[in-house]
Image (tube, helix red, strand yellow):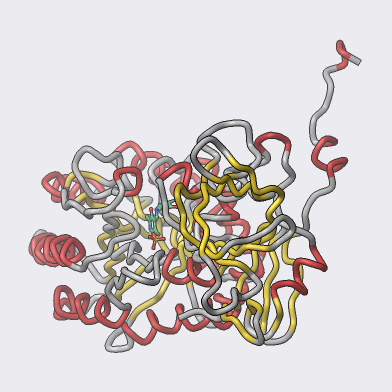
Amino acid sequence: MDHFLYRDGALYAEDVPVTEIAAAVGTPFYVYSTATLKRHFQLFDDALAWGDHLVCFAMKSASNQAIIKLLGDAGAGMDVVSGGEYLRAKAAGIPGERIVFSGVGKTADEMRMALEGGIRQFNVESEPEMIVLDQVAQSLGVVAPITVRVNPDVDAKTHAKIATGKSENKFGIPISRARDVYAMAAKMPGLKVIGIDVHIGSQLTELAPFEAAYRKVAELTETLRADGHEITRLDLGGGLGIPYSRSNEAPPLPTDYGDLIKRTVGHLGCEIEIEPGRLISGNAGLMVSKVIYVKSGEDRDFLILDGAMNDLIRPAMYDAYHDIVPVIEPQPGAEPAKYDIVGPVCESGDTFAKGRVMPAVMPDDLVAFRSAGAYGAVMSSEYNSRPLIPEVLVDGDQFAVIRARPTYEEMIARDTLPEWLV
Ligand code: LLP
């Protein structure tokens, strides 16, 4: 469910015509729907209503402070993976006790920042990290609450670049070593073990891998409790997938996922945490772009847009599919066209889609990339000296720019010349 629908022949973001935003901010741009963000958070919150829980939004998927603030106001916690994300969450008003710190390479500085500013827990991913966290906490005279992220060696059946739960991946500690690592943690005065963490990958379109992982976590909970550890919280990660192609994908719903959690770990009496990103933000955002040229090649037509791989890298990086639709609704029965849809960046990888059949469009027409709210703006860059594109938030009939497009001057002024070159 999203709130980007055709109305009176044109695409709307909630009650705002997309053309009106384009006229105000220029193209390309990202636009997010408040109603979709809130609704998707609520679906998870309701799916876990059977027990004590906290839904921590994975900020890596969309980290604009306006998005963080509105989800925080709805009751969300945040899953952060860097000092920058931690400070962004704090700046958006999220209290430390609702921020979870994940990530495989936390530095001592980042640990200090979070311990001083307040943190719900660290999800520790290795013995060396545990040793550093213990030292940092002791130097500050505090105790750091931790879970250990275990790697359950489960195949998430997703794209290789976003699978994290196999033994060959860099994440977590092998579940076979968990008892030793927990025993080691229990002896460290700067740490307090509170639970277990697991995350097996992203864009999972089946529940079976989650089930396999969560059953292993349940078993480990019993083992660790028998060893004398107090396991009161389970962080079950993120990863539930979304339908990128409306016509032929139907991944499991948050409610099925909530039932699965109850079935696999519900009997343990632990507080449940999850870290969904994509399912909350993905279908809550569009990237809107303008057609610059339609160019005839030897055997195909190229649709050349003003948006490029630097603005939305998912197709180039993961061969990801995004629905691309005209902003002005095509007439019923209009002849479809077939395009390779590309951006202006100087490499062939700057291709959004090959041989895509869609309604014919012309130069200056607007097109919208659907499902671009997650891992879109956050992964953008200024490659080819293309300024970062703006982000806009819609709420009902109002919209606001939540990150402005830098001017060329601002972008260039960030470089400085060493004195010997001046
Ligand atoms: N928790 C941890 C520890 C994670 O590593 C991730 C995602 C999440 C939660 C959130 O997963 P989600 O619910 O969003 O699937 N850039 C890639 C996705 C990378 C995901 C990385 N980790 C893409 O565009 O598909």
Q: Position of residue 258 (x, y in %)?
A: 27, 79
Across and down, in percent, residue 396 comes to 67, 86
Q: Quadrant of ligand 1?
A: bottom left
Out of 131 and 36, give the one closest to the viewer: 36
Quadrant where the C terminus is found in the figure: top right
Q: Which of the 4 quarters of the picture holds residue 27?
A: bottom right
In front of the other: 209 or 135: 209
Q: Where is residue 329 shown, x and y percent of the image?
A: 61, 76
Which image quadrant for residue 219?
bottom left
Residue depicted at x 69% and y 59%: 29
Number of numbered labels in the structure image: 0
Residue at 32% from the left image edge and 78% from the top image edge = 254
The answer to whether residue 216 is seen in the rendering is yes
Relative to 190, 22 lies left or right = right
Decide: is 190 above or below 62: above
Say which of 320 and 97 sits in front. 320
Quadrant the N terminus occupies: bottom left
| Residue 146 in the figure: left or right of residue 339 | left
